[in-house]
Amino acid sequence: MPDQSTPDAVSSPEAAAKGGFSRRRLLGTAGATGLALGAAGGAAGYAAAPNDENGAPTAPLTSVGSDAVMFHGKHQPGITTALQARGHLVAFDLAAGTGRKEAAALLRRWSATAQRLMAGEPAAQDDTDVARDAGPSSLTVTFGFGHSFFARTGLEKQRPVTLDPLPDFSSDHLDKARSNGDLWVQIGANDALVAFHALRAVQKDAGSAARVRWQMNGFNRSPGATGRPMTARNLMGQIDGTRNPKPSESDFDRRVFVPAAGEPAWMANGSYAVVRRIRMLLDDWEKLSPTAQEDVIGRKKATGAPLSGGTETTAMDLDKTDADGNLVVPINAHARITRPDQNGGAAMLRRPFSFHDGIDTDGVPDAGLLFVCWQADPLRGFVPVQRKLDRGDALSTFVRHESSGLFAVPGGAATGEYVGQRLLEG
């Protein structure tokens, strides 16, 4: 489960008051690509004072609207960026006859559009004006390649071995129509209209080169909804992701990103994203008492503290027993099974969105987690943990994995480049 916190955004009203700029211009210098998940602190603040239709300056944007993330950088945005309130995940398949040249043109269009929208500017052509009144709102757009992309573009020799299909898991109930894909796009923003605006722009840019294979919508707690930055809660009401790796840790880059000298060369500073639609069987879960729910997870529901005692960040004592000699943290508790030290050091940066897609005809909510995790090698990150969960996780009774995908996400584009250029033009 992911370790996220709501970003404590920092605004710059003084700068905005001096400017009189429209939302189509970004104030300030380039900021960091975002906060580490689970860490307290402020995102880089960008403020703009939009003009009305007569050119008169209006009130500056709020800190939520003015926060911006840089498109260009060592890594793509949307990986270590603070988790946003709204998200869209969408996979595309290349159209028949689309090859390497057309794919390169598509990634060039997508990169140009993402750069503009993340800066709070309109799309270059046929902008819908959906986000006209808003700022960047921490928008990020992230691009990845699926296993099938390489055969379709004649680039099989450049396909990473690490991108081999995930093994089958006993908990899988996968819908193939909502799994995998040639291309994958992750969109996140702290405003629903800004996120939707980016989704439409990406879809329109695809033109005749690619068609949508599947698309999913997610959400998280909005920035400022809590009195202090804190780890998010999921739809089961649990504090979710306390043990996510932090960028401040010495081995963070090694676990999450492909090294600069890694193979293949075009994946330098990139990462691999595992995407899973995990449905939560909430009716069954909510029949459990709070104590029973805590035993399933291994942590206190109110605070996220381990059942062995302490606070949310206290190390879990896996050997502690009660007066009757029973383990305080049950042997099949989710938090026990997923610990890196119980999985040969396997770790991944988990960055999901919750989803709710309505109520089934039998009155059951179609809701759960759009699970997205990042790692330098899924065979050493996601796979060993999921295999262990398959063998006896108490939570498995209350969740169902309904779709799955694995995508190679190259490093960030340098100024003047587009995402994937080193693959498509190398």
Image: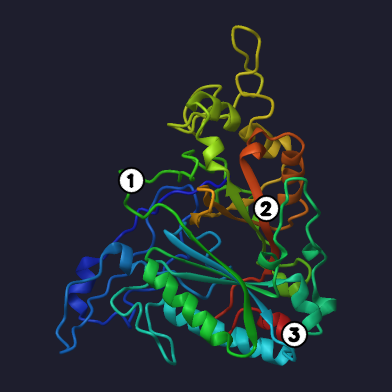
Q: Are marks 2 and 1 in contact (CB under 8 Å)?
A: no
Q: How packed is label 2: few (under 14 Cα within 10 Å), some, or many (20 or more)?
A: many
The image shows residue 252, relative to residue 149, as above or below, that is above
Residue at 16% x, 81% y: name it. Answer: 57
Q: CA distance from mark 3 to mark 1?
A: 47 Å
Q: CA distance from mark 2 to mark 1?
A: 30 Å
Locate residue 39 relative to residue 12 in the image: left or right. Answer: right
Q: How packed is label 3: few (under 14 Cα within 10 Å), some, or many (20 or more)?
A: few
Q: CA distance from mark 3 to mark 2?
A: 26 Å
Of callouts 3 and 1, the N-terminal one: 1
Mark 2 against mark 1, which lies toward the viewer? 1
- Residue at the disc numbered 1: 226
Residue at 71% x, 84% y: name it. Answer: 424
Along the line of sight, the residue nearer the viewer: 101 or 49: 101
Dot 3: what SS?
A: loop
Q: Are marks 3 and 2 in contact (CB under 8 Å)?
A: no
